[in-house]
Image (cartoon, rainbow, N blue to C red):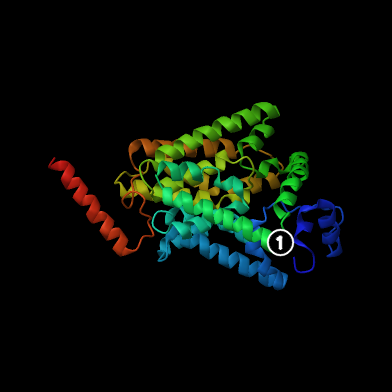
Amino acid sequence: MLVQPADVLYHIERLHDFQVGLGMDPSRFAPFPYPPTFLLLVWPLGLLPLNQAFYIWTALTFAAFIWAVAGPRPKALVVLAILAAPASTMSVITGQSGFLSGALLIGGLRLIGTRPWLGGLLLGLLTYKPQFGLLVPVALLAADAWRGIGATACVTLLLVSLTMAMFGGSIWLDWFASLSGYSAWFAAKTELLPLKPTILANLALLGVPGAVAETLQLLVGGAMAALVWFAFRRGMSSPAIGVLAAATVLANPHAFWYDLPPLTAAVLFLGTARLRAGQPLRWWETLLMALTLCLPAAMVWTDLLGAGLPMSLPILLAFAAWAAWQVRLGVIKPEQPRNLSPYASPFEAGAAREAGKAMDRARIYT
């Protein structure tokens, strides 16, 4: 964007020629499939040398993920748990966007109740990877977060307008036009299937025909939407957000192993909710949570060994079923009164609690 117009990113041949001019192997193919929203986040890094940009990107996105998961005053144990998670290690090594997606998704939802414009900004920026926001509307509708819905819609429109003003009025049309070429390239890269945790990729590894796999992907996506709906009907809470994070991976038609930091948050949120409810975890639940945490590393190791196993399918489906069981058990309860974010100020939280108590007393005596 500093030496070439932004629309070069969405013209595959021109982008490839530019990349080869920078020293890339001509036999390689490195498309840029991200929507223009992503440019707002990364273009300042183009002012820096590559190594500095990498370290700053990794540090900032990891810090944002810690903040989103653990809050503004994180406990050391939670930070250590996130650091130890294989998904975090993979994200640090690759410099990919898993931390950013998790921070925007989780942070946006945790703020949407009391700070709808800030929460809406984070969820609006999540449009840089729109497949990770598939279930967000379901969650907001279920939680009756109408201010958050309006704020997110307005912020998203503002971001679209801003990208058009900065990078050209046709930038979004160029992005849409580039998707078919990108999709065709990925469809041909069957060697990448073991590194994708999606239903489509797992079924392709099992030899399931494409039309059947797509149908099953839609059915699972519908089931995950229903799970998120029932979780968020109980109120906006960290466990509900954990359910959404896990469900998003299964509902997502396009993701890679480096996109799985939100699963770390799902394990932490749901496991903590069980312990706070005074319900100790059984051995098989602990094992399932450990398998879910280790899934990104296991996918990479089996791919390096040439095994190509569809291992993410049974683990993710089992974890989603376990999450549904937590909803059924009533483990998911609002940490604050309905529509109040866990990041609410003490004044907001106290006032809401007092109002809730008054309503409870009125119900008791009437």
At label 1, counting other C-alpha atoms closer than 10 Å, the crowd grade (few under 14, some 14-19, many 20 or more) is some
Q: Nearer the viewer, residue 280 or 251?
A: 251
Where on the picture, by quarter, is residue 51?
A: bottom right
The correct choice, above or below, for 275 with respect to 216 in the image is below
Identify which amino acid the numbered label 1 is placed on: Phe
Using the rendered image of the protein, determine whether residue 172 is visible from the camera's viewpoint: yes
Residue drawn where x is 66% and y is 59% of the image: 163
Residue drawn where x is 60% and y is 65% of the image: 58
Where on the picture, by quarter, is residue 96?
A: bottom right
Instruction: Give the percent coordinates (x, y) of residue 247.
Output: 51, 41
Q: Secondary structure at mark 1?
A: helix
Using the rendered image of the protein, determine whether residue 85 is visible from the camera's viewpoint: no
Instruction: Give the percent coordinates (x, y) of residue 8.
Output: 79, 58
Instruction: Give the percent coordinates (x, y) of residue 211.
Output: 68, 27
Left or right of 23? Residue 339 is left
Question: The C terminus is located in which quarter?
Answer: top left
Instruction: Give the percent coordinates (x, y) of residue 38.
Output: 64, 58
Q: Nearer the viewer, residue 281 or 158?
A: 158
Question: The N terminus is located in which quarter?
Answer: bottom right
Residue hosting label 1: 167
